[in-house]
């Protein structure tokens, strides 16, 4: 199949996701537990910085309620031999089954609330408020849901905002909103969409993932191709998808191949992938990062790299671009960079302000943009993975690039869940040099 990437026709790789969520082989081995620890790091001129293994036996899930337990015989054999025949290919957005469907009478859907290990927030505050508990109930499944036995859960800045109370949540809650592992149970509706017990999957934009089990709507589940390690797939959930929409969609086409794009934080997570994707799109890229991450940022293939902690950014950008400025700025740093981001814009350029790693961008008058008739957008991932087609299309690109070697996704640190606090500390200190995960 031929696809158009940045004006260049390329052959799509052999990795191809469809709405058929069925996976391939599943082998058993015990989950290894690793120990690791964080380090501290001072900041410059900034505000204070506030091939996975399958699961062990899950809680028994009532068979009579159409859940298949991993204890079932079927799961002890290669999954494709017993159940692949039952996997059905479905359209990208399968029609919802009406609850009144007489061929599908309603029945109890929820597994019993057996205890599990989870990192729980019972009061908001610093990282120390998040505690690992061993007796938290396994989540209930709603119609269309699947129960995923998590092997990894990704750590994202937004999790720290929920924990600190910056973004409001009802208490108590389990942290996290991306993960991956193996499907432990399916509802009939999810099964009808092709999801099977034992599938190797990743998902994002779903709460309560710092836990052994997460209830995930089948529409959010992406089957991980054999070629992609599970920790890499989980790393592509929030940050990879975000990098994709930032470089492909959020700038609304105001930057064209061959034109300049400024991307902040290219030595960390999201923007390390964004810089690579921007190059795949054919943009000329100026990256920024702190001094200690220059090796990583350079490896993304950026055309120019600026240490934004020691170099006066705007004059440097103007020097590089011949006084024109950049047609788009991708900025997840926020408070420390928003002003220089706007000043770096070219005429009718767009400021894509997607995050606040250093603090929130304050309110400012639209008149601020008049100098270059600039545009501004403040996007979020959910609005760029609205339909299953959109989700799969982005995942398809990402897994395809990984498979072809066009996209390098670096897992920087993997903390055991028991070190939930340390994982948040590491990210909030701005130390990430790639994806930061918990191993469950
Ligand atoms: N809107 C969305 O869809 C979306 C999606 C994902 C993330 N986000 C948001 O975007 C922001 C960045 O997330 P990310 O995934 O890009 O994080 P990340 O990969 O961990 O990158 C954060 C980087 O920001 C830089 N930084 C500069 N000043 C900092 C400070 N005061 N404290 C901490 N880090 C600082 C650091 O790199 P240097 O050492 O190079 O300075 C740090 O590694 C967060 O606010 C997050 O919530 C939004």
Image (cartoon, rainbow, N blue to C red):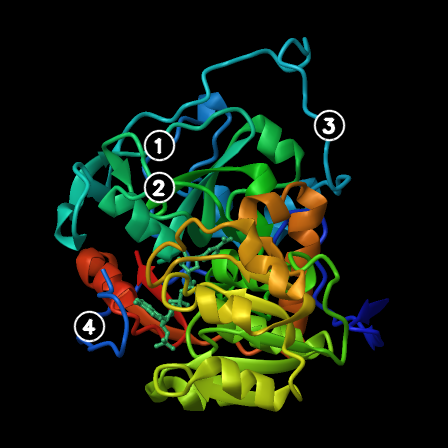
Q: In terms of sequence position, does the residue under pointer 1 or pointer 3 come before the other?
A: 3
Q: CA distance from mark 1 to mark 3?
A: 25 Å
Towards the viewer: 151 or 244: 244
- Would you say the residues marked 4 and 2 are in contact, meaning their CB atoms lie under 8 Å apart? no
Nearest to viewer (mark 4 / mark 3) = 4
Q: Secondary structure at mark 3?
A: loop
Q: Which residue is painted at 67% across and 15% down in the image?
A: 98
Image position, residue 173 (x, y; %): 27, 36
* Left or right of residue 11, residue 309 in this image: left
Q: Earlier in the sequence, mark 1 or mark 4?
A: 4
First in sequence: mark 2 vs mark 1: 1
- Point out the tag, 4 or 2, that comes first from the N-terminus: 4
Secondary structure, mark 1, is: loop
The spot of residue 122 in percent (x, y) is 17, 36
Q: Disc 4 designates what residue?
A: 38
Disc 2 element: loop
Distance from disc 4 to disc 2, alpha carbons, whole Å, reads 23 Å
> Mark 4 vs mark 3: which is more N-terminal?
4
Q: Is residue 147 left or right of residue 92?
A: left
Q: Is mark 2 within 8 Å of ligand 1?
A: no
Element type where label 4 sits in the image: loop
Which percent across, then down, holds residue 387? 67, 41
Mark seen at residue 208: 2
- Camera-near label (2 vs 1) is 2
**Mark 3, residue position:** 95
- Image position, residue 277 (x, y; %): 63, 73
| Residue 30 visible, this orientation | no
Q: Are marks 2 and 1 in contact (CB under 8 Å)?
A: yes
Residue at position x 44%, y 40% in the image:
72
Assess disc 2: are there few (<14), some (14-19) or many (≥20) residues with their C-alpha within 10 Å of its C-alpha.
many
Q: Is residue 96 left or right of residue 410?
A: right
Q: Which mark is residue 139?
A: 1
């Amino acid at each position: 199949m031929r696809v158009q990437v940045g004006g260049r026709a390329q052959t799509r790789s052999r990795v191809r996701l469809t709405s058929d969520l069925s996976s391939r082989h599943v082998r058993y081995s015990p989950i290894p537990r690793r120990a690791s620890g964080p380090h501290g790091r001072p900041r410059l001129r900034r505000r204070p910085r506030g091939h996975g293994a399958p699961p062990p036996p899950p809680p028994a899930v009532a068979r009579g309620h159409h859940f298949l337990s991993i204890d079932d015989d079927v799961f002890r054999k290669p999954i494709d031999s017993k159940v692949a025949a039952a996997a059905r290919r479905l359209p990208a957005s399968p029609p919802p089954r009406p609850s009144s469907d007489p061929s599908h009478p309603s029945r109890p859907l929820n597994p019993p609330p057996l205890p599990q290990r989870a990192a729980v927030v019972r009061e908001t505050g610093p990282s120390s408020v998040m505690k690992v508990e061993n007796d938290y109930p396994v989540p209930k499944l709603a119609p269309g849901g699947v129960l995923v036995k998590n092997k990894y859960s990704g750590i994202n800045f937004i999790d720290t905002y929920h924990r600190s109370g910056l973004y409001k949540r009802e208490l108590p809650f389990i942290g996290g909103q991306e993960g991956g592992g193996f499907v432990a149970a399916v509802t009939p509706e999810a099964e009808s969409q092709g999801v099977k017990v034992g599938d190797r999957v990743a998902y994002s934009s779903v709460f309560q993932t710092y836990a052994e089990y997460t209830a995930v709507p089948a529409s959010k589940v992406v089957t991980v191709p054999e070629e992609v390690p599970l920790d890499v797939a989980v790393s592509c959930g929030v940050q990879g998808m975000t990098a994709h929409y930032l470089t492909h969609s959020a700038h609304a086409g105001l930057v064209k191949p061959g034109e300049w794009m400024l991307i902040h934080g290219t030595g960390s997570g999201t923007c390390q992938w964004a810089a690579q994707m921007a190059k795949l799109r054919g943009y000329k890229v100026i990256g920024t990062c702190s001094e200690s991450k220059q090796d990583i940022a350079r490896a993304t293939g950026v055309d120019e790299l600026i240490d934004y902690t020691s170099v006066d950014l705007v004059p440097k950008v103007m020097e590089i671009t011949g006084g024109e400025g950049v047609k788009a700025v991708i900025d997840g740093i926020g408070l420390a960079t928003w002003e220089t981001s706007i000043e770096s814009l070219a005429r009718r350029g767009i400021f894509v302000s997607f995050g606040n790693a250093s603090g929130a961008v304050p309110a400012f008058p639209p008149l601020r943009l008049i100098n270059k008739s600039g545009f501004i957008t403040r996007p979020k991932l959910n609005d760029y993975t609205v339909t299953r087609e959109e989700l799969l299309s982005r995942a398809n690109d990402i897994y395809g690039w990984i498979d072809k070697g066009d996209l390098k996704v670096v897992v920087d640190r993997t903390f055991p869940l028991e070190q939930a606090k340390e994982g948040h500390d590491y990210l909030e200190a701005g130390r990430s040099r790639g994806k930061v995960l918990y191993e469950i």
